[in-house]
Image (cartoon, rainbow, N blue to C red):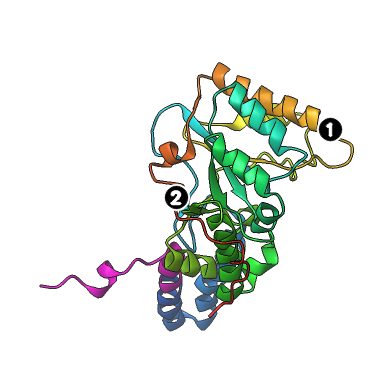
Amino acid sequence: MRNPFWRNQNFSAATWFGLAAFAGAGFLAALDLRLATVPLAMFILACLVAPFLPWLGFFLPVISKGTTGKPTVALTFDDGPDPASTPGLLNLLQRYSIQATFFVTGQKAERYPELITDILERGHTVGNHSYRHSTFALLRGPDAIRVEIVSTQKVLERFGILPLVFRPPVGITTPGLGLVLAQLGLSAVNFRFRPFDGGNRRLRNLARFTLDRVRPDDILVLHDLKPAKGHRVDQWLIEMERILVGLGKKDLTILPLETLINRPVMKKVKKSGPDNRAFVCP
């Protein structure tokens, strides 16, 4: 006997929730039509809230923690590269012999190619963080999402790499994102908690906040950006070093992201030419 149709489908949590909501609405409608609105309203509310819960794989599979089951964590840095912050950060990581993953934007990778080269030459890995870091692009549908992701892939191919992981700006997930990532063979990597540094706008007690909340198998999300007005790069680097030292004091070993999640973060490819700049969505 063949397996039932539903067993062969890779349905998202949103799909199952939606099916259950409509089934529940149909059952309740037979009792009282007004009751039928309850499960439907719950489904709509879940769809509105879920995009802003980066650890929740509601619309698509999301990797938000590691799989080691050991006291280990991985470091990731978003929004770079940045000539004000990246060189100092790379020196700090090298001093502690730590490998991190940099989720870079295509626009900045194009603007600062020497920093991408430096990141790779020092043994770090690179992930896709969209081209312009536009949250609104992710909300406009699959076509806009595809342009953001593929444009960045094209830029990074010039360095002889192709990211296999994508982190959406601000960790926001949508149904369209799941469709595009599945077509491109990328995995979504988010996080369990964010340090609320505001993209390096708030540095006070950043290390303490992070160390108080970190747990084994966490994927730490920090930012590779020039600190906002009122903060200096050296202050930010002090907070970064406090995090590195503090993780050691908590007996948490920092692993490469690919080791923590047990899957590759990027692969090497033949370098593409500098003229591969534009991507036209089919």
Q: Judge whether residue 211 can be spotted in this image.
A: no
Residue to which mark 2 is pinned:
268
Q: Which residues are magenta?
A: 1-19
Answer with mark 2 or mark 1, whichever residue precedes in sequence. 1
Residue to which mark 1 is pinned:
232
* Residue positioned 75% across, 45% down in the render: 198
* Residue positioned 54% across, 76% down in the render: 37
* Residue positioned 26% across, 69% down in the render: 8
Mark 1 lies on a secondary structure that is: loop
Left-right relation of 2 to 144: left
Q: Position of residue 25 (x, y in %)?
A: 46, 77
Q: Residue furthest right?
A: 230
Q: Residues within 10 Å of mark 1 (few under 14, many from 20)?
A: some
* Residue positioned 48% across, 39% down in the render: 257
Q: CA distance from mark 2 to mark 1?
A: 35 Å
Q: Position of residue 56 (x, y in %)?
A: 51, 53
97 relative to 3, above or below: above
Q: Judge whether residue 126 can be spotted in this image.
A: yes
